[in-house]
Image: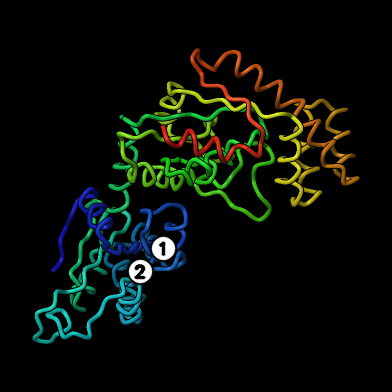
Amino acid sequence: MIHEIAVAELLGRQRAGLVILDTRSPGEFGFGHLIGARSLPLFTDAERATVGTLYKQVNPREALLSGLDIVGPKMRAIVEGATTLSSADFSSGGEGAGGGGLSPKPAIGVYCWRGGSRSSSVAWLLDTAGFEVYRLKGGYKAYRHFVRESFDDLAYDFRVVDGSTGSGKTVLLHALARAGAQVLDLEGIANHKGSAFGLSPGDVQPSTEQAENLIFATLSGFDESRPVWVENESRNVGKVFLPSHLVDALAAAKRYEIVVPTEDRLDHIVAQYGRYPRAQLADTFHHLRKRLGLEGAQRAITAVDAGDLRTAAEIALGYYDKAYAHYSSRQLPEGVVRREVRFGALGALGAEWGRE
């Protein structure tokens, strides 16, 4: 049987263990998808383009026939893929397997872009193959609307961690998480450390859309009666832009500032970025020449080329510390909780604040 259900019910069933299949193309899935969904595409990216072109330039019937030509040979693989991804067990002879047993049909969820022909086709096929199918009404588009609306009224007690560059704010967040606190790691979600040097070698950031999906999924798992700890960020983390309502909520939240000695910060920065290719570090300093000044940028590049990363880090901190001092004098509210701490004591501080 096929059930048409709304986003909230599908997510509830997912939390209870329902496996959800995304039937869109790999490119669509890669750009953004329901968190936890498994990719089981009806078409490849090229096949989707072919069918879409026929739909727009010829007529819907030709697009349908072309789609049938493509999907026909894939039908067995789709059923087998759904069976594997869902860990469905048809061996007991349940109703869906065609036997006379009383065991329930294995359940599965499906969606496409708008809840149209792709998810309808896969839902029909899986229903025929013995699944109890839950099809998302409105598809991924409805999910995205649900996600965006969730940011309109954020009722969480956010606790924002501030501190100058290299203070170990992310280290503190991880310590808070180990202590059982609820942590929203925006840099982890964006796969970026937040500064001009923030993209690790070989890493790729998610789309802003997918980052929003990840933030939504993380917040959805939190208890609104307990604090949510988060590092202070600007409106963007690398190329990922944060939801405006979240940025506003963080700006109004209680602040916790850590003040870490410069020597500790330099040790942390060198350890963190020392594994980066020197060419990448030098290129980043080149792009910072307007902020550092031509002379400062060149001195930093020369230090990087010589393997003297500590001197390069000192030059970078000269700029970042001035920027943070300007920010803190204007943006940090009265009543901020300020703690002077050595870098090595951040774990103990996380355990302390995590009990709040």
Residue 72 location, x and y as percent?
31, 79
The three-letter code of the residue at mark 2 reads Leu
Q: Which mark is residue 42?
A: 2
**What colouring does the structure picture have?**
rainbow
Instruction: Give the residue drawn at x 44%, y 48%.
Output: 210
How dense is the environment of label 2, judged by Cα within 10 Å: few (below 14), some, or many (20 and up)?
A: many
Q: Is 228 situated above or below 143?
A: above
Against 149, is 42 above or below? below
Residue closest to the eye, 266 or 339: 339
Residue 3 in the figure: left or right of residue 165 = left
Kind of residue at disc 1: Ser
Residue at (52% x, 25% y) in the render: 256
Dividing the image into 4 quarters, which one contains the N terminus? bottom left
Name the residue located 53 percent from the left edge and 30 percent from the top edge.
161
Where does residue 194 sit, x and y in percent of width and height? 60, 37
What is the quadrant of the C terminus in the image?
top left
Which badge, 2 or 1, is on the more N-terminal residue? Answer: 1
Left or right: 299 with respect to 243? right
Q: Does 173 sit left or right of 270 as displayed?
A: left
Residue 25 tag number: 1
**Tag 1: Cα neighbours inside 10 Å, few (<14), some, or many (≥20)?**
many
In the image shown, does 112 or 84 lie closer to the viewer?
A: 84
Residue drawn at x 18%, y 77% as measured from the top left: 130
Percent coordinates x, y for residue 112 in the rendering: 31, 58
